[in-house]
Image: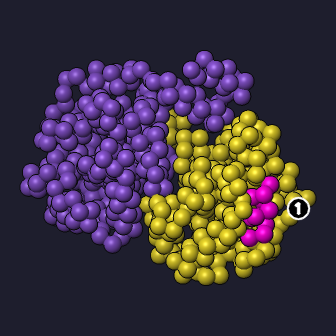
Chain colours: A purple, B yellow
Amino acid sequence: MKDTLNSFLMIGQSNMAGRGFLKDVKPIYNQNIHVLINGRWQVMWEPINPDRPTSGIGLAASFAGAWCANNPDKQIGLIPCAEGGSSLEDWSVGGVLFENALFQAKLAQRSSKLQGIIWHQGENDSFAGRFSNYALRLSAFVEALREQLGEPDIPFISGDLGDYLSEGRYGPYFTEYKLINEALLGFSSQNPHCFFVTASQLSANPDGLHFDAASLRKFGLRYFDAFTLRQNILKPAGDEAQRLEQIYNRSLTNAEQIAVLEIDFGSGKMSLQEYEKKLSTLKP
Amino acid sequence: MKDTLNSFLMIGQSNMAGRGFLKDVKPIYNQNIHVLINGRWQVMWEPINPDRPTSGIGLAASFAGAWCANNPDKQIGLIPCAEGGSSLEDWSVGGVLFENALFQAKLAQRSSKLQGIIWHQGENDSFAGRFSNYALRLSAFVEALREQLGEPDIPFISGDLGDYLSEGRYGPYFTEYKLINEALLGFSSQNPHCFFVTASQLSANPDGLHFDAASLRKFGLRYFDAFTLRQNILKPAGDEAQRLEQIYNRSLTNAEQIAVLEIDFGSGKMSLQEYEKKLSTLKP
């Protein structure tokens, strides 16, 4: 699998973990998309990064869906290590978040080629002047992570904090989010193989704090474009809705249909009789 | 927190991870029960060990609930590392399952006192004569794990495979499960600080493969009794239903009621208006 599976490390805070409501968007299920669990690759399901009971849709599923659309017959693996509410300081080298992400990525390297790091973080640095040395601190973090992974040139993709932040019920906490966005863009300009993605036109959950599911699906496409084109994505492409429909409308293979059926049965959503009846129509 | 949080490592296969249906039992929510995520302790929610999309109720939540009932004002932490479908061979020293569980337990040791290891595994060794050296291989595994954790005397609790196994739709695969149960009991008798728990009177999901949610709640009490009494539990106590009701009916603190409300809002189950209205009745 090492030669054929291409893995990506997911780090940052809640908007990388994902808080979009599962009921708001169509599912993405594709047996070419995997997630690292206990050091092994499983076919991805959502939520991918269950760091909290409110975990839901994130940006990584559509990122992976876009990657698969561009790389037919290849395998992608996601390594979920994002932690809700974390500050950049919380990601310090030697701390548990850094050590865990490094360990998980190294486990993944046993059976995959690490291709990129996707990062969304900054809400918890959007106050108290933390922006002033954010880019410098992020550079040190990325350099240490790349070095310890043995991947000095690995692409590192980051993204805007949402423009809705000042309006929501937590707005008073995040007065400096625009300065963090400037720091993220500046960081990407100054550091090799680092790219930045706009959150323009993306919207929030009713909490005014987390991107909603539909926005995160689009955000994932932008992360994918930044990774693939190796450039900043500073405005949304016009075809995001169509590209997402293509990902959603991909026909499931026979094996995927059987797997979806097994998940429904194994979760108690279907009786044994119904399961066996449906299964008999799928099994060759 | 290190002096006050008591942690337990969860390892084994799917019945330790938990496949009970969430809809079948009352929830257990207690801010004295934590789960290790990204190296940090979060208040526990279920599923605790999301190794598969079918993850659900396991035995660890009622284990922890019973522990809290016995240790008021103390904190417990669960370290979820169980992996569905794993054989004992899959848990070999140096393999990804062993390495990940060891790493997670060591992360936990930074901020807690590791008090025990809970194990449920064996379905995937219930064929092809694997029982013959199962106890010997399990001894080597436990010895290596204890040594690498620096906890040579840490209690290790295991449990019966379900008596339903031979009857279910996967019955033909698990012809030797009774011999594995004998091996587990023998192992516990021969190794210090190892205890064994019966699955007598416990039942299965419609798949005939996984314990159902109600059974896992009882199983957790038995694991707790084995841990606390430091002895095998070879028949069910008569008061399991009452003890579970006590755990379910514990009054939530004000902070817990607020947290439950935040989870419902953050998961999209409640509008902002409803959330703020309910919150205003709870906030002092």
B86 horizontally vs A31: left or right = right
| Whole-percent x, y for residue B161 in the image | 75, 54
- From the viewer's perspective, is B203 left or right of A101? right
Q: Residue at x 55, y 80 (%)?
A: B147
Disc 1: host chain: B
Span of residues in magenta: B178-187
Indicate the secondary structure of the residue bearing disc 1: loop
Regarding residue B214, the answer to whether it shows in the image is: no
Task: Please tell me which residue lies in front, B58 or A236.
Answer: B58
Q: Name the residue under label 1.
A: B235
Q: What residue type is labelled 1?
A: Lys
Name the residue at the left extreme: A190
Rendered residue at 24%/40% (across/down): A223
Position of B206 relative to A138 (above/below): above
x 54%, y 64%: residue:
B92
Q: Is residue A148 visible?
A: yes
Between residues B14 and A194, which one lies in front from this camera angle?
A: B14
